[in-house]
Amino acid sequence: MTIRSIACMAGAALALIGQGAWAAAALGQTAPAFTATDVAGKRVTLSELRGKTVVLEWVNPGCPYVRKHYGAANMQATQRAAVDKGVVWLAVNSTASEATDYLPPEKMAAWMREQKAAATATLMDTDGQIGRAYGARTTPHLYVIDTKGTLVYAGAIDSKPTARAADIATATNHVNQALGETLAGKPVSVPATQPYGCTVKYSAM
């Protein structure tokens, strides 16, 4: 295991312990508005997506928990299943530019292409405004917003908070479950779960 992996996993533990200190977007309320630039330089505004179901996925390629889900193609499969149903999937990178594992837009775009990601767009949130508005703590950390703009799910991608890809097969995919219920017009049965992963490396405020 590399020093980076150890540090990242230690950060994950701190994220789980210290989560009470974070302000977070409220479930059942209107999701925080934002406008951001994606890796291709295109502006994306959440309010313009009203009428569509939206998923926000916090991502950092340097995190072993992110690599767990991308390396096993689990994140891509979850993205693809959602996008095929008309969902807008926005990956969000809130890693500060001074962080050692920060990737500029062109390198972030290249990594997503290499992973064959199916996200609708990858947003750069280098100043951390979007992440802080949502209370995103870890990579990954996922949110589902319904067609009315209401936040209906926040938490982990699945029920196995480990960095082992082998655990994916026996995990419950919370995002698939939340999306299935939302798209069927049903309330989300498990609207909140504890996120797990590496701490988001926000810029200093």
Image (cartoon, grey):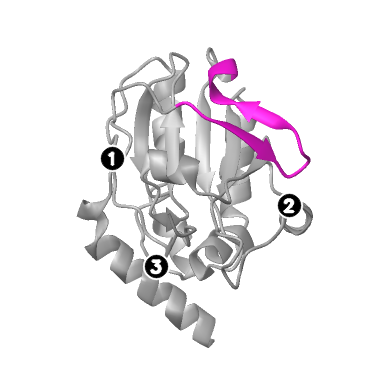
* Residue corresponding to mark 2: 105
Residue type at numbered disc 3: Thr
Location of residue 40 (image quadrant): top right
* The magenta stretch spans residue 39: yes
Q: Of the residues shown, which amino acid type is indicated by label 2?
A: Pro
For numbered disc 2, what is the local secondary structure?
Answer: helix
Left or right, residue 191 beside residue 156: left
Label 1 residue SS: loop
Q: In this figure, which residue is indicated by the disc labeled 3?
A: 162
Q: Which residues are magenta?
A: 33-48
- In this picture, is 55 found above or below 99? above
Q: Secondary structure at mark 3?
A: loop
Q: Does residue 92 show up?
A: yes
Q: Is residue 55 above or below residue 173?
A: above
- Could you tell me residue 67's position as x and y percent? 58, 65
The quarter of the rendered structure image containing the C terminus is bottom left
Distance from the alpha carbon under mark 2 to that under mark 1:
31 Å
Say whether marks 2 and 1 touch (CB < 8 Å).
Answer: no
- Residue 119 forms part of the magenta stretch: no
**Is 57 in front, or is 185?**
57
> What's the residue at 43%, 49% (across, down)?
141
| Mark closest to the chain's N terminus, 1 or 3 | 3
Q: Which residue is mark 1?
A: 192
Observer able to see residue 119? no
- Describe residue 76's horizontal placement relative to residue 157 as left or right: right
Q: How many other residues sit within 10 Å of disc 2, few (<14), some (14-19) or many (≥20)?
A: some
Tell whether 45 sits left or right of 155. Answer: right
